[in-house]
Amino acid sequence: MLSKRKKTVTGSLVLQRQPKIKPAKARQIIRRFHVLINKRRIICGVLKLALTENDEQRSASFINKELKEKGLETYYKQGWNAPHPDSELEKKMLQSQKIREDKELARALGYIMCEIHERGGLQNYQLASTIGQDKNRGGDSSKTLVAWFRAIREPGRRYRALEIGSLSAKNAISTSGIFDPVVRIDLNSNDPEHIQRQDFMDMSLPEKDSERFDLISCSLVLNFVPTPKLRGEMLKRFKSFLRREVNSAYIFLVLPLPCILNSRYMDEERLFDIMSYLGYERTHSHQSHKIIYLLFKTRSDVHKGVPLEADFNDRGKSIPIEYGKKKSSRTNLV
Ligand SMILES: C[S@@+](CC[C@H](N)C(=O)[O-])C[C@H]1O[C@@H](n2cnc3c(N)ncnc32)[C@H](O)[C@@H]1O
């Protein structure tokens, strides 16, 4: 385990100074975590186990319960209790798509879940993700946002911000003085005092404009969402959280460059088509070596104050917005 954690006498965690992880190690941890959750998704699909994609704790208890009901608990425990790394289980996990026997799948699943929950997989992943934000690594994508926002803000106005996938309460969004409040959420908060543990997809919809936001920051999060359908749902959901009784509300979207440069299913034009269909126009864009930064604002020709469903069903049918699906379906979106 990379992270050093101490407990108080009551058992609650005492946050220690964040351990340093070298960038190469951080990349390795992130890659490994993605392998674990991808293989888990495959195995759960075959075993028909309900996986709550965005809630690790719930996934773990569902898996436990359902494997018990299927009589596979013993095999799951064998995998869980196996030494790490275990060459046989490692191979099984990597080739899980070829395995047919439920018992073997349950063992590989136990091995994966133990690494995620018991052996620091999830915790180290969260720590490793913060490395990209380290100032020595030129990180903190929100610096770009703040530089853009300084030029477009109306003097004296207070902007409410929602930061999805927040890793730090000390990044530029939080310290610029432009945004107040900054509501920070993440699936697995590494700082519960300042960052709420909350899946954006389950967050209650605001009922009044005063509860909505002037800005949603979604930096390096969309690429984390596992399926095209869910990525589309996330983009679509932004609208319910953005203020309607102001001239413009904004979305700051940051993606790894390969998501639009090297993808068979997505390019810049298609992303803009989707955003335009959803009612946004791009105001700013910047590409660095590895990342694209985009700022969108709500289009003034899109009427405000209309319920989400009506916005998207105004052609008499619901049109799925699937970010990352085949480009040939582009005509559906414009
Ligand atoms: C790579 S980290 C990025 C973080 C940071 N915003 C940045 O720009 O460096 C992605 C984060 O998004 C979070 N995340 C992914 N899907 C989410 C969701 N549906 N709701 C809240 N957080 C989510 C993950 O837990 C993870 O911490």
Image (spheres, helix red, strand yellow):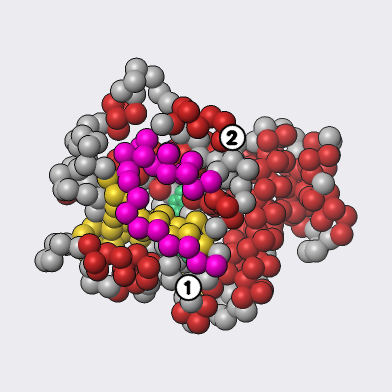
Q: Residues within 10 Å of mark 1 (few under 14, many from 20)?
A: some
Label pair 2/1, CB-CB below 8 angstroms = no
Q: Which mark is residue 326?
A: 2
What residue is shown at x 37% (from left), y 71% (from top)? 143
Q: Is residue 187 left or right of residue 173?
A: right
Q: Residue furthest front?
A: 269
Query: Element type at marker 1?
Result: loop
Residue 241 visible in the snapshot: no
Q: Is residue 312 left or right of residue 224?
A: left
Left or right: where 112 falls relative to 193: right
Across and down, in percent, residue 153 comes to 20, 63
Residue 195 shows which numbered tag? none
Q: Is residue 284 left or right of residue 300?
A: right
Instruction: Give the image location of residue 104, x and y in percent.
Output: 83, 42
Amino acid type of disc 2? Answer: Lys
> What residue is disc 1 on?
139
Location of residue 141 in the rendering, given as x and y in whole percent from the top left corner: 43, 67
Pick whichever, 296 or 54, lies toward us.
296
Image quadrant where residue 45 sits? top right
Quadrant assignment for the C terminus? top left
Coordinates of residue 240 in the picture (x, y in percent): 29, 40
* Alpha carbon distance from label 2 to label 1: 32 Å
Q: Secondary structure at mark 2?
A: loop
Give the residue displayed 55% in from the left and 67% down from the top.
289
Amino acid type for the residue under numbered disc 1: Gly
Residue 165 on the magenta span: no
The magenta segment is: 267-289
Residue 226's quadrant in the figure?
top right
Q: Give the residue at the far top of this rendering.
A: 316
- Ranked by sequence position, the earlier of labels 2 and 1 is 1
Q: Nearer the viewer, residue 190 or 267?
A: 267
Q: Residue at x 76, y 43 (%)?
A: 106
